[in-house]
Amino acid sequence: MKKEQLEIIRGSGNIYRDFDMADADVRQLKAILAAEIIKTLDRDELSVRKAQSLTGIDAGDFSRVRNADFRRISVERLMAMINGLGSRVEVKVKVRRGETVAHGVPA
């Protein structure tokens, strides 16, 4: 069997940007917030029903987070989930100049 030489490419730290996906920064933020929610659920051994009773947030939203389905969950909702579970969110913003974009297409 012949071994192929693999090319190693350093990522940007945002997989969604690396794959040129729309709203990459929002998707990355949602993934980070969801990971924190999942860590809390696992650490405290909370079912989605128990999380619902503690936070008042629908168990279906916690299930969607566990399944990495963020299409119908806003950043604000994810932050409310974290707050309801007893944690706080601290956001640090770093703004960098991006590529020039004309009508949604990089120039």
Image (cartoon, helix red, strand yellow):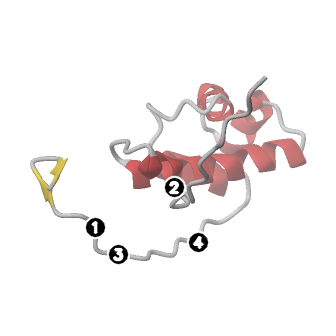
In three-dimensional space, the C-alpha distance between marks 2 and 4, rounded to whole angstroms, equals 19 Å
Say whether residue 46 is left or right of residue 16: right
Label 1 sits on what residue type? Gly
Mark 3, secondary structure of its residue: loop
Q: Please give the name of the residue rendered at 35% of the width and 75% of the height, measured from the top-left corner.
A: 96
* Dots 1, 3 in contact, CB < 8 A: yes
- Identify the secondary structure beneath mark 1: loop
Whether residue 66 can be seen here: yes
| Structural distance between the alpha carbons of marks 1 and 3 | 6 Å
71 sits to left or right of 8: left
User: Which residue is the site of mark 1?
Assistant: 98
Residue under circle 4? 90
Measure how far apart labels 1 and 4 are at the Cα level.
24 Å
> Dot 1: within a 10 Å radius of its alpha carbon, few (fewer than 14), some, or many (20 or more) residues?
few
- Residue 51: x percent and y percent? 74, 38
Element type where label 2 sits in the image: loop
Look at mark 3 in the image and give the residue it sits on: 96
**Image disc number at residue 80:** none
In the image, which disc is placed on residue 14?
A: 2
> Which of labels 2 and 4 is toward the front?
2
User: Which element is circle 4 on?
Assistant: loop
Q: Earlier in the sequence, mark 2 or mark 1?
A: 2
The answer to which of marks 3 and 4 sits earlier in the sequence is 4
Amino acid residing under circle 2: Asn
Asked if the residue under mark 4 is in contact with the one under mark 3, i.e. CB atoms within 8 Å, the reply is no
Q: Give the distance between the C-alpha atoms of the residues marked 2 and 1, in whole angstroms.
A: 14 Å
Distance in Å between CA atoms under marks 3 and 2: 14 Å
Is residue 89 positioned above or below 22 on the image? below
Residue placed most toward the observer, 64 or 15:
15
